[in-house]
Image (cartoon, grey):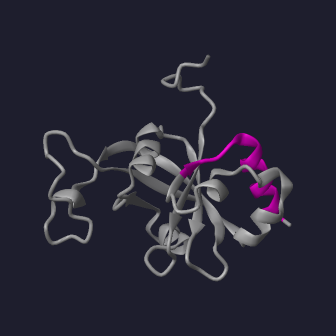
């Protein structure tokens, strides 16, 4: 088993959702990097805490026409406490999150690639190699792991 701290390790793969009218792949390309905050689901939070610098993630446009994978981002900094949980003026404020043991975490991502076309959800559902994707099994989850074979299949679809 490879040590996750080994600099030569193979990056893990993820899928991270954002509504494009809130923050899109084009916004990330323009900004070059962003702090992925505001996640308020324990499973998604745990996935973000498991991310390592260098891991790759699909940038998924949700609640869009079409919803689907729009590109790739790279984890640029390890997870750290999400400051929005402590700000009463922020939509993501959580009054029950203790400052000495923060409940919510976030990562910094940087733009890697915008796909020539969005790989739509309907296409993902219709692709036999992708039928077991966490995206399809846990559709409401905003951050999910992606298996290596699933990663390759979606990248290939984005090129056709």
Determine if the magenta segment contains residue 148: yes
Q: Residue furthest top?
A: 1
Q: Is residue 158 above or below residue 134?
A: below
Left or right: residue 142 compared with residue 139: left
In percent of width and height, residue 38 lies at 34, 62
Residue 45 seen in the figure:
yes
Between 26 and 141, the one nearer to me in the picture: 141
Residue 113 seen in the figure:
no
Q: Quadrant of residue 84?
A: bottom left
In percent of width and height, residue 11 lies at 60, 37
Left or right: residue 93 compared with residue 72: left
Report the quarter where the C terminus lies. bottom right
Image point (45%, 73%), residue name: 23
Determine if the magenta segment contains residue 102: no
Magenta-highlighted residues = 144-159
Q: Is residue 117 above or below residue 54?
A: below
In percent of width and height, residue 34 lies at 40, 61
Image point (47%, 63%), residue name: 32
Image point (47%, 37%), residue name: 52
Report the quarter where the N terminus lies. top right
Image point (44%, 68%), residue name: 31
Left or right: residue 91 compared with residue 11: left
Between 125 and 155, the one nearer to me in the picture: 125
């Amino acid at each position: 088993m490879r040590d996750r701290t080994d600099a030569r390790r193979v990056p893990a793969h993820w899928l991270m959702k954002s509504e494009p009218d809130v923050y899109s792949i084009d916004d990330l390309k323009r900004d070059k990097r962003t702090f992925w905050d505001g996640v308020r689901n324990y499973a998604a939070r745990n996935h973000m805490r498991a991310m390592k610098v260098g891991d790759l993630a699909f940038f998924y446009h949700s609640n869009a026409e079409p919803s689907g994978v729009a590109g790739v981002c790279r984890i640029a900094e390890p997870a750290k406490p999400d400051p929005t949980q402590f700000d009463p003026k922020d939509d993501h404020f959580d009054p029950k999150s203790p400052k000495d043991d923060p409940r919510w975490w976030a990562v910094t991502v940087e733009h890697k690639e915008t796909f020539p076309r969005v790989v739509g959800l309907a296409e993902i559902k219709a692709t036999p190699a992708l039928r077991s994707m966490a995206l399809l099994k846990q559709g409401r989850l905003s951050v999910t792991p992606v298996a290596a074979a699933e990663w390759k299949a979606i990248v290939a679809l984005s090129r056709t």
